[in-house]
Structure formats: C-alpha cells, structure tokens
Image (cartoon, rainbow, N blue to C red):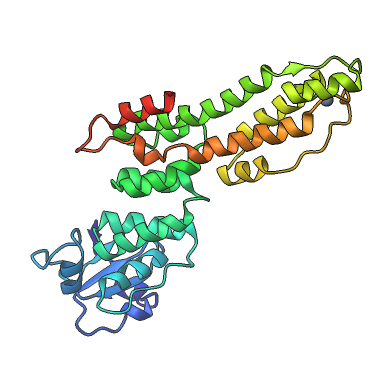
Amino acid sequence: MTRPTPGNALKQLQHPLFENDPEADVTFCSTDGDMFHLQRKYLEANTGAFPGSEFDTRGEITHLTETSVVLHLLFQFVYPRREPSIEDIDFETLYALAEAAEKYEAFHAMTMCKIQMRSHVSKHPLEVLSHAARHDYPGLIQDAVPHLLRKPMVDVIEQLPTKFIVPWVRFRESWDSSFEQAIKGVLELRVVPPNTVTKHAIYFSRSLEPEICSICMVSVLTTLYKLKEMETVEDLKEALTKKRAKQAGCLSSACQYVNIVASTCANLKTKLDELPAFSTFVPTAAAPHNITNVSQKNNT
Ligand SMILES: [Zn+2]
C-alpha cells in the first residue's frame, strides 16, 4: 500500500485544504495524483481503519485507491470542521464516497452517506441495494426493494443477503398475484356477441353483470400485460389512474369496455396500495414466524 514517491514531482498536485498544515504527519496520494497531508490524530479518533500512530510511515506517501474528489470529501468528514455538503453530488461520487467510508470506517461519513443514499433510491435502486446489502443496512435494503419490483428477479436476488431472498420472493409473488387476479377477472367476464343485442337486452345485461366484446377484452388484457411490464412502480400507479376511451374496433354497443377497464385498473391499484410493506415479510429475531403469518394472511 505504501511506497516512496519522489516528492518534487507530486508537490504541485497537493490539495489546498490539506496542503499547508504544519502539524500534518501523514500523507496520502489519490489515484489521480493529488496529495493530502493530514494529522494522524484525527484519523485515529474518527476512523477505524486508517493506520494508527503505532504505524510510522516515516515520510512515505500512502497511495489510496480513491480519486481526489472522493478523498477530499472523505477527509473533510474526518477533520474537526463543518462537514461537506453531499446533498447535491452525483450518485457515482456518492457511491464511491460511501464505499470509501465503509472501507476506512470513517464513521460519520458512513452515516451521512447512508442517509443520502435514500434520496437516490428511486433512480438507483440496484446500486443502493448492493451497497446496503454488502454493508448490512437492513433499513436501506427495505427502502430499495419496492423500487425493484419491475427488475428481473435474478438481478435483485443476486444482490440480496441470504436472509432477504425468501422474503423478497414472497413479496414479489404477492405483487404479481394481484396482476394475475386482475387478468383472471377479465377472462371471466361475459363476452357479448357482435352487434346482436337489443336496447332492452343491453339494459338488463348492464344491470346484471358487465359485458365486453372480444376485441375490447383483448385490449384490456393487453393493457394489463403492459402495466405489469412497466419500469417503475410510480409510472405504473400513474398509468393505473389514466382514463381510457372507447375502442375504435369495438364490436358491440352493449360492450362496457370503458367502465370495465376503469374498474379493473382501480381495483388493481387498490390491491397494490394495500399490499403489506416488504419489511413485514422479513422475519425479526423476536418474531421468527412472521413470514408464515403474513403469507397466510395474504392468501385469505
Ligand atoms: Zn368492445
């Protein structure tokens, strides 16, 4: 990790914030060649994995595998100064900072990165999940999973710690079964034949059970399959409330497509909204049978 480096060649790349401290007794170099002179006592006090005072670098430069941007942020968290603002940094930098904070056990940076990761969870759920799973942040895992419902099952399971895999499969199953029930409901509708129904029959048929023509039934089913494949849960829930006009190719004046598609989408949205949160599928130490209980509850 450490090796002697010609000081003159790198001097011009010293970082301003960590450049002129006369009490600095340790020097780090980023992957892109910036130098950071720090006081070891702050590293000792505020991190768990940087070398302590018993490790004398004798003026050698320690080369780290992080970029200058990441180290600049990281070291500010370690020093007794106002912490850097990380609310507006891009996700890639935040992720690299969070990983560096975990690697060097920069405790305050670890906490702040974990909090900040939450605001990126809808756009980068798999990456947030990966970070949360590797560093054991169950709360962050649970924040990420609802955004992963539309991702392929395998992609998610690959990132999950073992204890979350079965809960995830069950959570996903309960979500998918809401769609299956909606599709089944449409398939069970009475199909009205093309243009053979009298006005009188329309009145009675509408009052008894909804009817749909075959063309419109295919359209409702296609809508449901498209909804099921939507990228994000947010888009899905918005699409479920969208108004849909009468179909151009509708075969019968008795067909109730508009009402049927609206009620099918509304019922599906209610079902999805009412699904238990992912956290309820995860067993706790105090209640090891929680999964079974929730699963049974869902089936009733
Ligand atoms: Zn129709």
* Camera-side residue of 99 and 146: 146
* Residue 274 in view here: yes
* Camera-side residue of 137 and 21: 137
* Residue 65 in view here: no
Q: Residue at (61%, 26%) from the top-left corner?
A: 182
Q: Quadrant of residue 254?
A: top right
Q: Is residue 171 above or below residue 101?
A: above
Quadrant the C terminus occupies: top left
The percent coordinates of residue 100 (x first, y second) are: 32, 57
Q: Residue at (30%, 59%) from the top-left corner?
A: 101
Q: Report ligand 1 position as a quadrant.
A: top right
The percent coordinates of residue 133 (x first, y second) are: 33, 43
Q: Is residue 69 left or right of residue 254?
A: left
Q: Residue at (45%, 67%) from the top-left corner?
A: 87
Q: Is residue 209 left or right of residue 194?
A: left
Q: Is residue 26 left or right of residue 140?
A: left
* Camera-side residue of 292 and 5: 292
Quadrant the N terminus occupies: bottom left
Number of callouts: 0
Q: Residue at (24%, 62%) from the top-left corner?
A: 107
Residue at the left extreme? Answer: 54
The percent coordinates of residue 280 (x first, y second) are: 35, 38
The percent coordinates of residue 276 (x first, y second) are: 42, 38
Q: Quadrant of residue 228?
A: top right
Q: Is residue 291 above or below residue 3?
A: above
Q: Quadrant of residue 49?
A: bottom left
